[in-house]
Image (cartoon, rainbow, N blue to C red):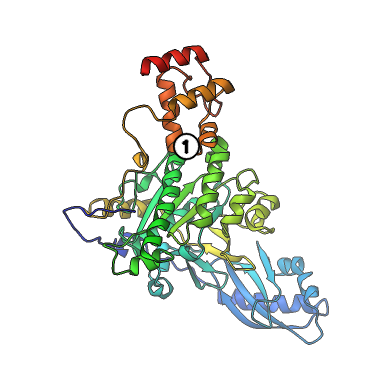
Amino acid sequence: MNPQKNSEDITYHFPPLSLLKERRYNRIDEQEVKENAMRIQQTLLNFGIRVQVSDINNGVRFTRYEIMPEMGVRIKEIVKRESEIRIATKATDIHIEAPIPGKPAIGIDIANKEVPIVTIKEIIESREFKESPSSMTFAVGRNIIGEVVVDDISKMPHLLIAGATGSGKTVCLSSIIMSMLYKAGPDSVKMIMIDTKGVSLSIYNGIPHLLIPVVTDASKSLAALEWVRLEVEDRYRKFAEFGVRDLAGYNKSDRVPCKTPQILVFIDDLSDLMAIYKSEAEQLITRIAQSSRGAGVHFVIATQRPSTDVITGLIKANIPSRMACSVFSAIDSRVILDERGAELLLGNGDMLFKPQGCMKPIRIQGAYISDEETENVVHYLKNQTISTRTFCDIENRDKCDDDYDPYFVETGRFIIDKGKASIGMIQRMFKIGFNRAARIMDQLCAAGVVAEEEGTKPRTILMSMEEFEKLVKEMI
């Protein structure tokens, strides 16, 4: 929270759009579209259902046929004929929205034979993206009728993304990150990236928006989250001193020497972190998410395994905005969206987007960015010498000197008495943060009190109480 200026001050240069690929437009077969409209009308007429196609919208993955039923026609009779319409139009996929929200019409969405790529460039170039005042605006994609969809993470205020391998989950993360690089400088938005597999986010190492290098070690992931928790608390203390409620009010104050950036925390994959440190990770994420909106700290959390042991009730309750790419089962869909539907998605960026306050998920073809484009932009940013306000080192935020921690002796006695040792035990017993508990554990290990770490198992105790008391006397 207490940034410092470097002596050198060079302005952030936004990456040029020329680093991104142009959109490739697909050819719409107008004749086939007209014939499908006639087929829909005739198929329903065969069952005594009279309708008129009132409008046709060509989207990215689907073409929507808006139909107006005659008076007296029951909507459920049209919905029941989905299979017959699929056969008549030879559709690979079909979806009926009855009725279309805000319209006295029913939407019949027929899958297009050719699906073009929705590029990140076309969304960033769009009026919707350019005119959005928020520095946390990101590209989502295009909806069922081809309209550009963007959103603001700061209003969400946290986003949960789930999808199986190949569904477009990782590309979605990249689109959000790339949107920030084109929308906000590092003095406005800072990022922390936790990539437990070390594959999807490591490419961003070196960009000026990162507070620290991409975190790939699980234990350091918790240290990073603990730093975020302390940062949120520190910000609220500052707000109280300045008599303001949130980050926006703080940054508007004339008494503030320099503005404090928003922080965006990315986690991919949550399931890996929960497999090792479920209790600690859940506790930290929940505690941060509950209070961090006003402090300008926001989560984007992704997982390829949306099960209840990963996306727990506490995490779901505090991360209200959801994005579901294709998943394996209706159960997975219910976990992420609280309803079915994601199991029927077609993959490759086909998604259901349910931001906070939205009663029904919106079907989106997500914005795509290739690895080559990402590398080009990251390379461009790495070549800039940018002076940004630097924060204290995350891993050393609450670090004391090289002496033993004041809780060292008490902790040693506690774990020997219990016959086992874990960082979580130390945290709960002494009500301290993960960083400090981990440091005490390292000191106990170096002193020969406990064994080295063995995966997720509690550490073995190597000393008796008598041996430990002898060690304490030698330390004194």
The kind of secondary structure element at disc 1 is: helix
Quadrant hosting residue 76: bottom right
The quadrant the N terminus occupies is bottom left
Where is residue 204 shown, x and y percent of the image? 36, 48
Which residue carries the number 1 mark?
218
For image coordinates 52% across by 54% down, the residue present is: 289
Where is residue 11 shown, x and y percent of the image? 22, 61
Kindly give the residue lying farthest to the bottom in the view shown: 71
Q: Nearer the viewer, residue 200 or 114?
A: 200
The quadrant the C terminus occupies is top left
Kindly give the residue lying farthest to the left in the view shown: 7
Where is residue 345 shown, x and y percent of the image? 62, 57
Q: Vertical placement of 401 versus 52: above or below?
A: above
- What crowding class fits label 1: few (fewer than 14 Cα within 10 Å), some (14-19), or many (20 or more)? many
Residue type at tag 1? Ala
Q: Vertical placement of 106 versus 475: above or below?
A: below
Number of marks in the rendered image: 1
Q: Nearer the viewer, residue 179 or 1?
A: 1
Where is residue 70 shown, x and y percent of the image? 77, 86
